[in-house]
Image (tube, rainbow, N blue to C red):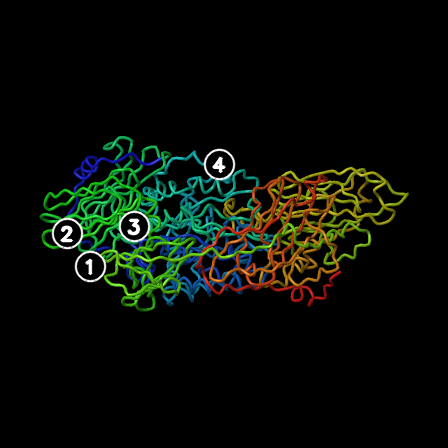
């Protein structure tokens, strides 16, 4: 629903209540941290390199897109949306797999991202944690910390030293893009990390988890986050039901940090979704939609916020074992750029807001004049005014915010050499149109709008486009009235004194197709708006405009199209040629002074994908641990008898069966317990196990080769007694095998109280067996020992490309059956659609060759059948674990996999592990599995590299055999 039409008389009443002030001198008193003047601030906003700046930022986690060649794609899409900043979390757990090692290579080396940001003209907010939350396992805290009792502060020193060195050399003071550094994250009620890192001179800030006054005076700048729609499972939410808008933000900032900009290091840009969601991220995108962006982002502006970071801009994929216990693989987040890297309607709305902010700097410095809820019935109106220029901005929404719309009206401001008296249409941007100021505005088709400009004497009006324009001169004001039609209308006004003015009027849909790329200037920060770059062009039509250069009369554009597209160019006085992605467009025509048109041709390329349903698959059983003659490959004794964990075992002795104590912190775990039986001993009547694996985990239990059953309650710990009859027992050694999921660590950071090490305490929730017992036997006739398997070589894992979270402890993972180059020629031919036939674990492998057309961005996804079944499957693509399908919980069945993990021009290996927990047909097979294209875009980024270490490198050189 849109806002009720605003009659101009209502605006006049507002205007008369608070007439514009005359421009006056205003000496802003800047503050800094005493270390650098490169980033300063006053009570209104930040200054970067001396330029007052509205920080318009989006969140991106490079480690959620494990293809460094694609990081520039996200940077360019942020730039195209008008953002001037990207905020990034680092990941302690990925970079510090064991004490003493800091790995800043490959996907942990953020230097290519910093370089791309600098080259594209995007500032960076660095957020290294050490705790980050981010719906990643234990908030980024590495597993080795969970198994010791050292102070939290001591544990992260190696990581902190390494990552701060990378940050320090990329600060704006060193010619890099980093302008702010976050210290800690969402820390409650205690002394988190708040020391200034050595070598860092840019301002530090804290992100409080709400209006809690935490660490207010411990950093240079204070900020807090807000998630108005904070339901943990947005996929289960009703997208038609909204909460009301908070109106306390301004007063809280003013009371808490007077003299500082109002800063949201995180504001809701989408929402996380959890296992068991019914709607998935599609519902999240409906809930936190473009209306949400208008209502809630505008309320930030109404609250005086001039530094905002939207979490997330691109969510990506929490691949492998990186998710926290409640999160599934996708981290699409309902963000403006979806998991497949496609721009959405939210990207378009964000662009409309960001171009407004980028274009009208009066808005960076405003005072609150009043909040008015009475002048216009049912409307909540915030009046802001620039104290120097006298320009005013009225932010409108319904008193009932759940009616879901908002807009901004501007009055009395100067653009170029022209003056706007008022406009009820929304402002987008302005530029020079062949020597005339051109204002760009938009609104909703079918609604009426009015604009007034300062123009003297008789005014000549001409218009080209579908909207009918009426003009009225009341010297020295000229007023435009129109009922907006779909499309764009270009209005030219010529005053009696010769002054010319243009107005480009678009309906909302047409406005979303407009792009305003930057043109590089000079110097070290040539591509940064506000420092050197300019925006003399307006482009309409393409799916995406990434970049532009203008050399005299030669224009070059780079971007993407998904169909043959008419491109309209506004701004240049003269153009002799236009290139699109380095290809000349031969059909350039001038439509009138300062406007040009050309056509980008698109031909749908042949995209040939393999039919995985008819492919040759090979199969091998992956549960030899239940066999009496199992050789114990890659299992270690689980023989520790003490623990530093504050969570003691429930029962069972004498061994502590917590995986973290043995160096296994992620993925499936396999426990193998031994006990003796003969004719002189009492047969147990049951095997009792209390397995802990976090929310949504499951376990399966075998006695020798006999399946005792599953344990799958979706709780953190499952206690089960599995009945045993004597016919299941062997004379001599008997083995109980427990296969369990490790669903990642909990997000316990927000539960921390007030002691150093408090976080480490809360993050020691066990993963393993907290209880084990043979029912019916006394204490002297219990288990004689246990062994454990986790990921191959544990904390010393050899895969320095895919990192420590990629693999778990399934036998096939330990053997490297998921890796490219493994010789499966001796395996049985069997498809995952035939399955296992009984509870157990199997691996299915296939290979195929891709040869996709060059010069196109073609996002691909692997799609499982969505039918419910009691099985769990992991998807490995060229050795990367890119998906976890839990068919009895859901919701995810489609798993995007990017070029760079997939080789678009070579051979690919796809492996499915299938863990069948039930006995039914639906439980022991995967009904269907296919590879699909999600779109075809001519353009994209080029030179995407693959780096997929194979079996020889990661297993063969360590003496692992194929058998």
Residue 789 point in image, percent of width and height: 70, 54
Answer with mark 3 or mark 4, whichever residue precedes in sequence.
4
Which residue in the protein does label 1 denote? 435
Q: What element carries label 2?
A: strand
Bin the neighbour count of mark 2 within 10 Å (Cα to Cα): few under 14, some 14-19, many 20 and up.
some
Residue 439 point in image, percent of width and height: 24, 51
Which residue in the protein does label 4 denote? 237
Marks 3/2: CA distance?
Answer: 25 Å
Q: Is mark 1 on a helix, strand or loop?
A: loop
Location of residue 268 (image quadrant): top left
Answer with mark 3 or mark 1, whichever residue precedes in sequence.
3
Which residue in the protein does label 2 denote? 494
Which residue in the protein does label 3 denote? 356
Residue at position x 69%, y 39% in the image: 719
Give the left or right position of residue 410, taking residue 844 as reference: left
Answer with mark 3 or mark 2, whichever residue precedes in sequence.
3
Bin the neighbour count of mark 1 within 10 Å (Cα to Cα): few under 14, some 14-19, many 20 and up.
some
Answer with mark 1 or mark 4, whichever residue precedes in sequence.
4
* Vertical placement of residue 676 versus 16, above or below: below
């Amino acid at each position: 629903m849109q806002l009720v039409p605003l009659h101009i008389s209502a605006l006049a009443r507002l205007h008369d209540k608070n007439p514009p002030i005359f421009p006056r001198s205003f000496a802003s008193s800047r503050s800094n941290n005493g270390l650098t003047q490169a980033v300063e601030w006053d009570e209104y906003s930040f200054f970067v390199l001396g330029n007052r700046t509205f920080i318009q930022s989006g969140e991106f986690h490079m480690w959620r897109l494990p293809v460094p060649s694609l990081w520039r794609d996200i940077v360019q899409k942020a730039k195209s949306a008008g953002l001037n900043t990207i905020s990034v979390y680092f990941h302690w757990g990925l970079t510090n797999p064991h004490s003493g090692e800091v790995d800043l290579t490959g996907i942990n080396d953020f230097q290519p991202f910093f370089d791309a940001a600098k080259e594209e003209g995007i500032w960076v907010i660095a957020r290294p944690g050490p705790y980050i939350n981010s719906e990643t396992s234990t908030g980024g805290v590495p597993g080795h910390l969970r198994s010791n009792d050292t102070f939290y502060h001591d544990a992260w020193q190696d990581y902190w030293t390494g990552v701060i060195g990378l940050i320090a050399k990329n600060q704006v003071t060193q010619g890099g893009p980093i302008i702010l550094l976050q210290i800690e994250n969402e820390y409650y009620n205690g002394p988190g990390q708040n020391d200034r890192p050595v070598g860092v001179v840019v301002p530090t800030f804290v992100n409080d988890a709400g209006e809690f006054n935490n660490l207010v005076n411990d950093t240079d700048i204070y900020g807090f986050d807000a998630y108005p729609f904070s339901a943990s499972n947005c996929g289960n939410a009703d997208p038609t039901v909204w909460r009301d808008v908070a109106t306390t933000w301004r007063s809280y900032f003013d009371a808490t940090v007077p003299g500082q900009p109002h800063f949201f290091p995180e504001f809701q840009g989408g929402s996380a979704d959890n296992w068991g969601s019914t709607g998935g991220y599609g519902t999240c995108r409906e809930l936190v939609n473009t209306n949400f962006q208008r209502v809630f982002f505008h309320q930030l502006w109404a609250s005086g916020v001039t530094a905002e970071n939207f979490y997330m801009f691109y969510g990506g994929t929490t691949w492998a074992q990186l998710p926290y216990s409640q999160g599934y693989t996708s981290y699409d987040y309902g963000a403006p750029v979806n998991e497949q890297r496609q721009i959405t309607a939210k990207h378009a709305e964000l662009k409309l807001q960001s171009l407004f902010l980028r274009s009208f700097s009066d808005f960076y410095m405003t005072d609150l004049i009043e909040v008015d809820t009475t002048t216009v019935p049912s409307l909540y109106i915030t009046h802001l005014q620039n104290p120097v220029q006298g320009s005013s901005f009225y932010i409108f929404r319904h008193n009932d915010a759940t009616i879901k719309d908002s807009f901004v009206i501007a009055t009395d401001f100067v653009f170029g050499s022209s003056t706007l008296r008022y406009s009820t249409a929304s402002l987008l941007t302005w530029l020079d149109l062949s020597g005339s100021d051109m204002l760009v505005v938009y609104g909703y088709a079918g609604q009426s709008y009015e604009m007034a400009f300062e123009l003297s004497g008789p005014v000549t009006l001409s218009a080209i486009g579908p909207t009918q324009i009426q003009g009225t001169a009341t010297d020295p004001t000229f007023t435009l009235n129109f009922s907006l039609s779909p499309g764009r209308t270009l209005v030219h006004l010529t005053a009696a004194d010769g002054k010319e003015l243009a107005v480009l009027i678009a309906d909302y849909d047409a406005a979303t197709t407009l792009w305003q790329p930057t043109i590089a200037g000079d110097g070290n920060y040539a591509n940064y708006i506000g420092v050197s770059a300019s925006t003399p062009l307006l482009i309409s039509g393409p799916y995406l405009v990434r970049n532009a250069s203008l050399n005299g009369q030669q224009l070059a554009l780079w971007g993407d199209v998904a169909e043959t597209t008419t491109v309209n160019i506004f701004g240049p006085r003269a153009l002799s040629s236009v290139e699109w992605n380095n290809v000349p467009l031969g059909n350039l025509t001038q439509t009138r002074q300062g406007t040009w048109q050309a056509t980008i041709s698109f031909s749908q390329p042949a995209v040939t994908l393999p039919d995985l349903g008819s492919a040759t698959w090979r199969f091998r059983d992956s549960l030899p641990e239940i066999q009496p003659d199992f050789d114990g490959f890659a299992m270690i004794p689980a023989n520790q008898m003490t623990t530093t964990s504050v969570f003691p075992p429930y029962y069972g002795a004498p061994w502590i069966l917590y995986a973290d104590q043995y160096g296994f912190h992620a993925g499936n775990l396999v426990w193998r317990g031994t006990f003796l039986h003969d004719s002189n001993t009492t047969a147990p009547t049951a095997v009792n196990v209390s397995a802990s694996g976090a929310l949504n985990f499951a376990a399966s239990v075998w006695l020798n080769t006999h399946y005792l059953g599953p344990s799958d309650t979706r709780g953190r710990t499952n206690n089960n007694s599995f009945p045993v009859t004597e016919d299941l027992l062997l004379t001599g050694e008997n083995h109980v095998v427990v296969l369990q999921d490790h669903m990642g660590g909990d997000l316990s950071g927000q539960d921390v109280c007030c002691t150093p090490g408090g976080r480490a305490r809360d993050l020691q929730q066990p993963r393993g067996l907290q209880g084990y017992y043979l029912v019916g036997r006394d204490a002297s006739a219990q288990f004689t020992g246990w062994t454990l398997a986790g990921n191959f070589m544990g904390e010393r894992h050899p895969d320095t490309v895919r990192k420590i979270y990629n693999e778990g402890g399934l036998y096939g993972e330990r053997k490297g059956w998921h890796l490219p180059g493994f010789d499966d020629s001796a395996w049985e031919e069997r498809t995952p659609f035939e399955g296992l036939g009984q509870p157990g674990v199997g691996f299915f492998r296939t290979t195929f060759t891709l040869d996709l057309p060059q010069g196109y961005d073609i996002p691909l996804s692997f799609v499982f059948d969505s039918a419910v079944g009691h099985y769990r499957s992991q998807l490995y693509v060229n050795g990367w674990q890119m998906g976890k399908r839990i068919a009895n919980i859901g919701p995810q069945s489609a798993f995007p996999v990017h070029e760079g993990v997939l080789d678009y021009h070579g051979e690919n290996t796809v492996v499915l592990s299938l863990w069948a927990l039930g006995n039914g047909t639906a439980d022991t097979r995967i009904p269907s599995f296919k590879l699909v294209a999600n779109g075809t875009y001519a353009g994209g980024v080029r030179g995407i590299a693959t780096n997929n270490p194979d079996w020889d490198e990661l297993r063969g050189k360590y003496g692992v055999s194929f058998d």
